[in-house]
Image (cartoon, helix red, strand yellow):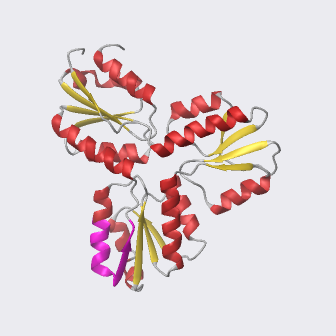
Amino acid sequence: MSNKEIKLAKYAGFCYGVKRAVETAKKIKLENPDKNVYVFGELIHNADVIRELNNLGIITLYEIPEHVENSICIIRSHGASPDIISKLKSAGFEIHDLTCLDVKKVQQKAMELVKDGYFLVIVGKAEHPEVIAIKAHAEQYGDKILVSNDISELKLHEDELKQNKKIGVVVQTTQRLETLNKIIEYLTSISKELKIYNTICLSTTYRQNEAKELAKENDLVLVVGSKKSANTTHLAEILSKISKTIHIENADELSNYENIIKSSDKIAVTAGASTPVNIIENVINYIKGGN
């Protein structure tokens, strides 16, 4: 495999928000060795990073205990609902909020739209933790809110949408621009007033645009990152329409694709925003024959 031409994307791996969350979480534990340090939900969507944090004593918390002492709880990069934060405080946790600043902006825009009387459409996956938190923040000010990343789903609520003079739109930060554009086109056809905040973060836009160009220029694209990561799965979906694309979590999975790799002379490698650099390097070393 060593004679292959391998191109690594410039925008591959940790984005600013993820880098900030991981580094700050480690710093919090280092500066508070005598305190229990938890994260409510996985800090980022990457199993290797979660294991590393766990080994450092930064434990992922899935349920809120009734009472704690001498304990810190970190709000993960995806954010959390006001109710969850309130319950954590009531339980006795010292809160450190590491919500991505771009996600904070979406929460703020969503709240403003609902306050101003707009029927809010959140473009995203309803079960994603970022979207759950955005919706929960907006619900403090009203209940005219829909979450969808599919036009057919929105059409089920068309009568309800048409009854509202004003419709506002925000977007999950890791969504595809194509998805947003389709939904805007549909909402434009049924709304009297439409206010749109394109809150897809710049890191996602740069990553997707660069990867599209790489896909056109190479025989195979490897997308490295968690299957639970929204931005990584969207990346793989986009690229699979342009070139042969394989979505893997780490180098261990590459043995399943030996024939495809052997038959590809030009290979591009990109990675999701929660993929650490060592995992990307391991993938490249494998392709080069250093496995």
Instruction: Answer above or below: position of 100 versus 277.
Output: below
Q: What residue sits 33% from the left and 24% below the top?
A: 256
Residue 185 percent location from the top left of the image: 27, 71
**Numbered-mark total:** 0
Q: What residue sits 50% from the left and 36% below the top?
A: 46
Q: What residue sits 58% from the left and 30% below the top?
A: 51
Instruction: Answer above or below: position of 221 versus 111.
Output: above
Q: What residue sits 27% from the left and 21% below the top?
A: 258
Left or right? Give the position of 35 relative to 20.
right
Residue 202 percent location from the top left of the image: 37, 52
Magenta segment boundaries in residue numbering: 182-197
Residue 23 percent location from the top left of the image: 57, 36
| Residue 191 shown in magenta | yes
Residue 65 percent location from the top left of the image: 76, 49
Image quadrant in which the C terminus is located: top left
| Residue 179 shown in magenta | no
Image quadrant in which the N terminus is located: top left
